[in-house]
Amino acid sequence: LLGASVAAFTVMKLAGAVYLTALGLRSLVAAARGPRGRGAPPVSSPRTSSAADRAFWQGLFNNLLNPKAAVIFLSIVPQFVRHGDSAERLLVMVAVFALLTLGWLHVYGAAVAQAGRYFGPRVQRGLSALAGTVMIGLGVRLAFERR
């Protein structure tokens, strides 16, 4: 049983390392390419519906597949659960947690969008390159970590 859990952990660790590295490479490529051609909309233009939909689904899947989100949820919520709690109370707690997360992510997203409009595409490219480098570094470190 212990061997199976170690193998499962190793597989998850390597999958996470590959995912981080792929995200980092994608970010570096985007930084190197710069704006999407001559007809690309300026940074301050409103998003199209398909871009907003794509961003929503990407954010949803990133959050649902994020192991940190599951760990935080599973470590914090049980502290507020009492023996004999009704399903309604548990549902309200989960809903409040989801709304707080949604509110925070909206504030964070608005701040990042405002910063992008203020600083312009050159700084955005630099930050994308930095983020890509950090993600690749973390992916490599995770792949070679012994624990």
Image: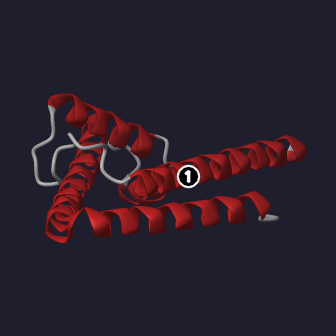
Decide which of 121, 21 is in the foreground and name it: 121
The quarter holding residue 122 reads bottom left
The answer to whether residue 82 is seen in the rendering is: yes
Residue at 23% across / 50% down in the picture? Answer: 102
Q: Nearer the viewer, residue 78 or 44?
A: 44
Query: Which residue is at the front of the view, 106 or 20?
Result: 20
Q: Position of residue 77 (x, y in %)?
A: 39, 54
Q: Is 11 located above or below residue 110 in the figure?
A: above
Q: How is the image coloured?
A: secondary structure
Q: Quadrant of the N terminus?
A: top right
Judged left or right of residue 9, residue 131 is left
User: Residue placed at 70% from the left, 51% from the top?
Assistant: 13
Left or right: 87 with respect to 41?
right
The residue located at (80%, 45%) in the rendering is 5
How far from the left and from the top, in percent, is residue 28?
50, 56
The residue lying toward the viewer, choosing from 62 and 101, is 62
Q: Residues within 10 Å of mark 1 (few under 14, many from 20)?
A: some
Instruction: Determine whether 131 is above or below 102 in the image.
Output: below
Picture coordinates of residue 33, whole percent (x, y): 41, 51
What residue would you read off at disc 1?
Answer: 25
| Amino acid type, label 1 | Leu
